[in-house]
Image: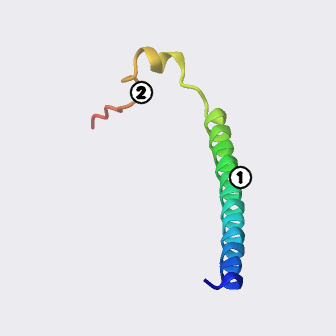
Amino acid sequence: MDMPSTSMINSNNGILQQFGIAMLGKELQVQESQAAAEVAMINSMPSPSLESLVNPAVGNNIDIGV
């Protein structure tokens, strides 16, 4: 067995593993920021009025006669 090539392969595997971990960490940061933006967007939406909760059909249709 060729020992120098084996140690080079092990070294490359370690580098690739470190790179993969760094990329997963960056993806986690991106996902966290997107989730925070979605939560902020949902929190900024106006809450429904009490009338629409009690009677949701009111105000949805307009009857027009000509």
Task: Answer above or below: position of 9 versus 32.
Answer: below
Point 61% across, 30% down: residue: 46
For the residues marked 2 and 1, what is the alpha-carbon distance in whole angstroms? 43 Å
Give the number of the disc on residue 8.
none
Q: How is the image coloured?
A: rainbow
Residue position marked by numbered label 2 in the rendering: 59
Residue position for label 1 = 29
SS of the residue under disc 2: loop
Label 1 CA crowd tier, 10 Å (few <14, some 14–19, many 20+): few
In this view, 33 is above or below 10 = above
Please state which of residues 38 and 27 is positioned toward the viewer in this rendering: 27
Identify the element where label 1 is drawn: helix
Whichever of labels 2 and 1 marks the residue nearer the N terminus, that label is 1
Residue type of the residue flagged with mark 2:
Gly
- The reply, left or right, for residue 50 in relation to residue 26 is left
Q: Residue at x 70, y 55 (%)?
A: 25
- The part of the image, by quadrant, that contains residue 36 is top right
Q: Quadrant of the C terminus?
A: top left
Image location (x, y in percent) of residue 3: 68, 81
Count of numbered marks: 2
